[in-house]
Image: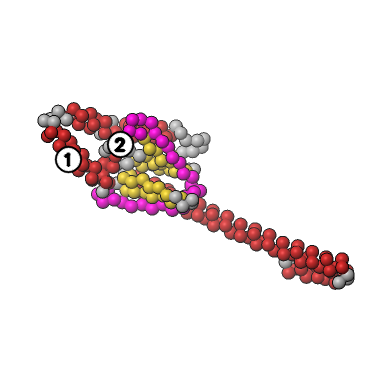
Amino acid sequence: MRGLFNIIWCVVFWAAALLFTLGWAILPLGLWAFMVFLGADRRAERCREKLKGLLIKNEAVIADAMQTRAQALFGRRQYVATTNTRILRLRRGVLGGFRMLDYQWKDLVDVTTQENTLPLINGSRLTFALINKSSFFVDGLAPEPALVLYKQCQAQEQIWEEKRRIRAVDEYRGNYVQQEVDQIGSKLKKIKTLLETGAINDVEFEELKAKIIARG
């Protein structure tokens, strides 16, 4: 409901400002409306172009979404994109500049989506859980682009979940084989000691050795 709250707060604030300043607040109101609404689509496109200029070689944007205007009446809208290698999050400063955060697909554990009340105003929320048990969310993303983003993240989540499962199985098998090799080596050393001390003869040593290797 943040977007709706922002709209109500803006209406109340500017109405009060116009009332108490006998209309003189129309000038800052006009400047604020110009900065927030006029040219918003053009600025959003510049944001996309800026992000594309930061991509590495052979990287391409697959899906993207920007916050609804109601969610960012007092700041610049956040922009989220997915590429073939990572998730990108662009946070722009009020007075210019930006901060880009990126998250590798291999670190993504889970992604969830929630459509807010009055989605055309409040948008949707995407929440990302990472492998290091940290998480982040971006609220107020335009609903349809947010859904495309969610589907892309879900596909990558499943791909990397399967990769992690296969890696875990391989590691388990490797550890198991190493334990077996260590046990065989330990048993062979014991019968070698028995041979050297004369507790068994060469024939018995070879028989025991064959049995240990066969069982292993």
Against 124, residue 92 (above or below) is above
At 13% across and 33% down in the image, what residue appears? Answer: 20
Which numbered tag is attached to residue 75?
2
Tell me, yes or no, whether the two marked residues, 2 and 1, touch with CB atoms within 8 Å: no
Magenta stretch, residue numbers = 93-119
Q: Quadrant of residue 66?
A: top left
Q: Quadrant of residue 178?
A: bottom right
Q: Is residue 141 left or right of residue 169?
A: left
Which numbered tag is attached to residue 122?
none
Q: Is residue 186 left or right of residue 59?
A: right
Against 116, residue 91 (above or below) is above
**Magenta stretch: includes residue 78:** no
Query: Of the residues shown, which amino acid type is indicated by label 1?
Result: Val
At 46% across and 38% down in the image, what residue appears? Answer: 60
Which residue position holds label 1?
12
Q: Is residue 213 left or right of residue 126?
A: right
Q: Position of residue 16 (x, y in %)?
A: 15, 37
Would you say residue 199 is visible in this rendering? yes
Query: Which tag, 2 or 1, sits closer to the chain's start?
Result: 1
Q: Residues within 10 Å of mark 2 (few under 14, many from 20)?
A: some
At 29% across and 39% down in the image, what residue appears? Answer: 72
